[in-house]
Image (tube, grey):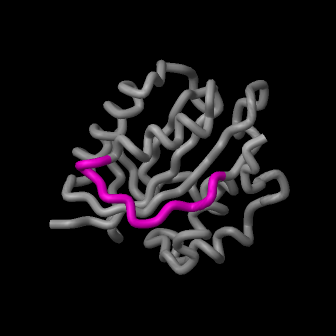
Amino acid sequence: MEHIVYLALGSNIGNRLANLKNAVGNLTPQMNVKKKSPVYETPPWGFKEQDAFLNQALMAETYLEPEELLGHLKRLEKALGREESFQNGPRLIDLDILFFDDIIIDSPPLMIPHPRLHQRAFVLVPLNDIAPNLFHPLLGRQVQDLLLDVDRVNVNVYEGK
C-alpha cells in the first residue's frame, strides 16, 4: 500500500545545498518524491550560536510503514555523514517526518504529526509551498492557517550565495 508522507529537510554544515540534494537523491527506492519546495535559508532555531540552515519540504509516496520510514531516514542521515550532536545543534543533514497520511502516532521515538511543526517557520514556509491546504489532524487547521501564527521575517528563498 502506498502512503503519502511529508518530510522536512535541513542542513547547516558543509555544502548545505549539496547535502539536501544528496538526501533527496538517496530517498529512493523506498520513496518516490512527488513535490519539492524551494530551498530556504533560515536562522538557527533553539541553539543560536551556529550557522544558518537551508531547509526544504517534500511530499513523497512510500510503501514503508511509519516505523520503517523512521528507520530508513535515520540510516540515511548516518550514511550521508550525520554525527550525533545535542538537541537543536548543528547538523549535516536532518530528515523529519511531518505527516504520514492522516494518522496520529504518539509513542516514542515516533510522533506524527511532528509535535513542533506548527511553531517553526522554517518548516511551515516550505510546507506551505507544496501543501497549503494540508490539514493538521490534531490542531484542526490547514498549513496555510498555521503559518499565520509564526514569524517568517528571516525565512528567505535561498539564492545560492
Residue 63 placement: quadrant:
bottom left
Q: Is residue 76 something one can see in this rendering?
A: yes
In-image side of 8 versus 76 (left or right)? right
Residue 143 placement: quadrant:
bottom right
> In which quadrant of the rendered image does the C terminus lie?
top right
Query: Residue 69: image x %, image y %?
Result: 28, 47
Q: Residue shown at 53%/56% (left/top)?
A: 57
- The residue lying toward the viewer, choosing from 158 and 103, is 158
Q: Is residue 49 above or below residue 33?
A: above
Query: Residue 47: image x %, image y %?
Result: 71, 30
Q: Residue shown at 26%/65% (left/top)?
A: 3
Q: Residue shown at 48%/19% (left/top)?
A: 84
- The residue lying toward the viewer, choosing from 32 and 110, is 32
> In which quadrant of the rendered image does the N terminus lie?
bottom left
Query: Residue 74: image x %, image y %?
Result: 36, 34
Q: Residue shown at 30%/63% (left/top)?
A: 61
First to last magenta residue range = 28-39
Query: Residue 48: image x %, image y %?
Result: 77, 31
Q: Is residue 92 magenta?
A: no
